[in-house]
Image (tube, rainbow, N blue to C red):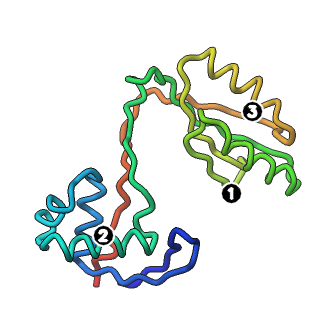
Amino acid sequence: MQINGKNSSMTTTTTTLDKTDLKILQVLQGNGRLTNVELAERVALSPSPCLRRLKQLEEAGVIRSYAALLSPETVCLGLQVFIRVSVDKGSHSRDGFAESVKQWPEVLSCFALTGETDYMLHAFFTDMQAFSHFILDTLLSHPGVLDARSSFVLQEVKNSTALPLHHLAAD
């Protein structure tokens, strides 16, 4: 399966993924801390070819990065919120908002959307006071922000970082 991607220098690349590459990706999505030897054992390769394939996947931009996923509650961030933001329709307002949101550590994700809302923010806070401070002093005071509507997470039903890859194995 050939896929197009961007490598670390933002150059467009075409990469061919075979069943072994897909297995490497699936295993790493489950545990990104495996040593090369452990990974090679799980995908039935010797360590050298496994490492070579892994480096190719990284250089092609298929693997973006590796990270530790923290439990929000254990670091006192028990208030999880989705915030829908409407901004002034001018491109200056949109660009300014997009640049500002990158500087707000409470916001883990920001998506530009179609429909009634311009952006969806996914954020974590210590408590309602911290949330209120962010909304009133940061978000709503930002030039160009017209409205913000929030939904609080009551229960996390599913949270996965693993992308589905079964469509790539169809060949």
Label pair 1/2, CB-CB below 8 angstroms? no
Q: Residues within 10 Å of mark 2 (few under 14, many from 20)?
A: many
The residue under label 2 is 54
Residue occupying the point 63% across, 22% down:
131
Work out whether 147 lies above or below 59.
above
Q: Which of 141 and 49 lies nearest the eye of the viewer? A: 49
The amino acid type of the residue labelled 1 equals Thr
Label 3: element kind: helix
Alpha carbon separation for disc pair 3 and 1: 20 Å
Horizontal and vertical percent position of residue 62: 42, 69
Alpha carbon separation for disc pair 1 and 2: 36 Å
Q: Is residue 154 left or right of residue 111?
A: left
Label 1: element kind: loop
Residue occupying the point 21% across, 62% down:
36
N-term-proximal mark, 3 vs 1: 1
N-term-proximal mark, 1 vs 2: 2
Q: Which of 2 and 120 lies nearest the eye of the viewer? A: 2
The residue under label 1 is 114
The amino acid type of the residue labelled 3 equals Leu
The residue under label 3 is 139
